[in-house]
Image (cartoon, grey):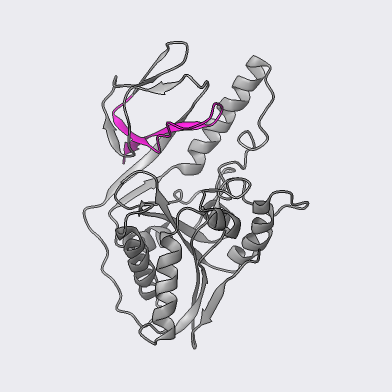
Amino acid sequence: MHFKSIQFTGKFSGPKLIVTGAVHGNETCGTVAINRVLDDIDAQRLKIVAGHVTFVPITNPLAYAKNERTGDRNLNRNLYPIASPVDFEDHVANWLCPLLAQHDALLDLHSTRAMNPAFAMLGPINNGGPLQPFAHFQKERAMAAHLGVHRFVDGWLGTYALGVERRRTLAVASGSTLNPLNTDSRYGVGTTEYMRSVGGYAITLECGQHDDPRSPEVGYQAIVNTLAFLGISDGQRPAAVGNIEHLHMVDVIDKQAAGDSFIREWASFNKLVKGDLIGTRADGTALHAQTDGYILFPDAKSLPGNEWYYLARAE
């Protein structure tokens, strides 16, 4: 399998944007949206006038061909160049990471299993810390405000680091073997985190449910808006959205045993009140919400030792 990108450069100077789809192979709304924008450019309905834009309709061709989330493993974890590639995603990383580093900004299009409204995952505030140093908070938030969606979530990498440390501690205490993937300090690094690590800024846009026909439209509008907002296209600059809901991820809870179960069928952004029963461990231990907030990315099919659900609070 080969890797494909399509690039356009305008006559005038400007920012360099990369737009990616199908990082997960069963999340095809980005592919559809990108191909629609490419058709617009070819038909002169949309003109690239400044800067540079790269489109990657199918970032993970093996996962896309299988119509599954992964090829050999999750490309959107542990993303960095691999000296001795083994998995197919290692080869993708060795092509994708240098490509990302050639750009200023990334718009990465995804979708979700559950029927949730579209939302964007954002990076941290400006900081010089060891986990995720960042200097483009204002640029990233301004780009997010012009995508056309109203819900934003941050705190991804810090929450992952918390989960990694908890897994390491549990493994040491139990004498079990560490999983080399989800106990790696780089486990939470995907496309957007890698982009920030090489000096850019980035947004993951969850366009909606996998099979919802509205999801490709959300992705398409986000691309068109971003090109116009950055001045790369000749499109009319979009207005910033109002009525924004901003959530901050604060914790991740792993499934520890196959018998761990939810008390009900949860969906992302279901509200939690302090004390609400979320689920029970196989040994009967009850898991309650420690504060008011929201549940994110609940995965009833999660395997033991992996993320089961996340918790967030309103900002």
Can you tell which quarter of the image residue 129 is in? top right
Q: Residue at x 45, y 48 (%)?
A: 124
The single residue placed furthest to the left in the displayed view is: 243
* Viewer-proximal residue among 95 and 33: 33
Residue 313 percent across, percent down from the top left: 33, 36
Can you tell which quarter of the image residue 199 is in? bottom right
Residue 298 percent across, percent down from the top left: 40, 34
Magenta range is 291-315
Marks counted in the figure total: 0
**Residue 269 can be seen, yes or no:** yes
Residue 158 percent across, percent down from the top left: 50, 39
Q: Residue at x 60, y 35 (%)?
A: 182
In the visual, does 29 lie left or right of 161?
Answer: left
Residue 166 percent across, percent down from the top left: 56, 26
**Residue 198 can be seen, yes or no:** no
Where's the C terminus, which quadrant?
A: top left
The single residue placed furthest to the right in the displayed view is: 84
Quick check: 18 above or below 82? below
Where's the N terminus, which quadrant?
A: bottom right
Q: Is residue 213 magenta?
A: no
